[in-house]
Image (tube, rainbow, N blue to C red):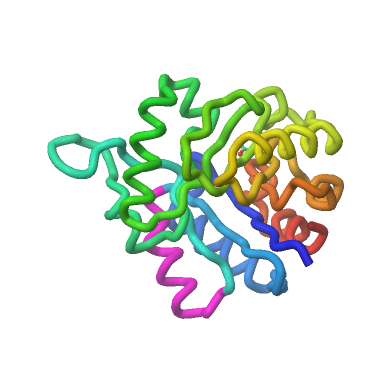
Amino acid sequence: MKHLLIIANWKENKTIDESMQFMDEFSKLYSPREEAEVIICPPFTSLSALFQYILENSTKVSLGAQNISSYEEGAHTGEIAADQVKGLAKYVILGHSERRAMGETNELIEKKLLNASGVGLMPILCVQDENTHIPMGTMIVAYEPVAAIGTGNPDTPENADQVAGKIKGRNQSVKHVLYGGSVIPENVNTFTSKQNISGVLVGGASLDAQKFSQIIKNA
Ligand code: PGA
């Protein structure tokens, strides 16, 4: 059976209290699946509380950050380093199109990738198509066409599968290609059933405990 990664990207949403409310509701609805790893990527401010919650409740989810600094440490006000995140999270989303739109370049993203790998934090590199630069050694890629993000207009599963196949064909190190962009409980399986797609990155629908637990069931 295929190993699936199902990722919640909360973006700039949820206070600490709201994150805890989500976990309480989600825990009642969520049935862990042997073949699926569920990864929640909250804002930095909620990481510590979620880490504690998961520890105390033995919740079967992993944590990820949504970004890290391109610097390892030092005088960089407002930045958070890979090794600071490492104590709380297993994964980090890098190169999301929303960050690229704010000016992140491939060069900057590659520095972040190196920092993450250097401390054992697993990067999930977002790309917008098969032509986006993927540094050597990258293992997890999320294909997220910009026009599909937050619009309710997902890519077709056939096209997403083709792009995922090309990404794997061109980049030997890539083990998992995920799809992201307007994934909801009703369409998740049309993507995860495709040969080259090993999971989903979910934005909007991951903010709702009911919808997100249903996505996990349906995937
Ligand atoms: P969406 O976002 O599910 O709200 O389209 C996906 C993402 O940006 O990762």
Q: Residue at x 19, y 35 (%)?
A: 76
Q: Position of residue 193 (x, y in %)?
A: 84, 52
Q: Residue at x 69, y 46 (%)?
A: 205
Q: Please identify the dominant SS of the magenta region.
A: helix
Q: Residue at x 66, y 41 (%)?
A: 168
Q: Quadrant of residue 159?
A: top right
Q: Quadrant of the N terminus?
A: bottom right
| Segment colored magenta | 44-59
Q: Is residue 72 magenta?
A: no
Q: Is residue 21 left or right of residue 32?
A: left
Q: Is residue 47 left or right of residue 126?
A: left
Q: Is residue 100 left or right of residue 61?
A: left
Q: Residue at x 47, y 35 (%)?
A: 135
Q: Quadrant of the C terminus?
A: bottom right
Q: Is residue 143 left or right of residue 75?
A: right
Q: Is residue 53 magenta?
A: yes
Q: Position of residue 22 (x, y in %)?
A: 58, 60
Q: Nearer the viewer, residue 199 or 61?
A: 199
Q: Quadrant of residue 48?
A: bottom left
Q: Position of residue 180 (x, y in %)?
A: 68, 39
Above or below residue 199? Residue 171 is above
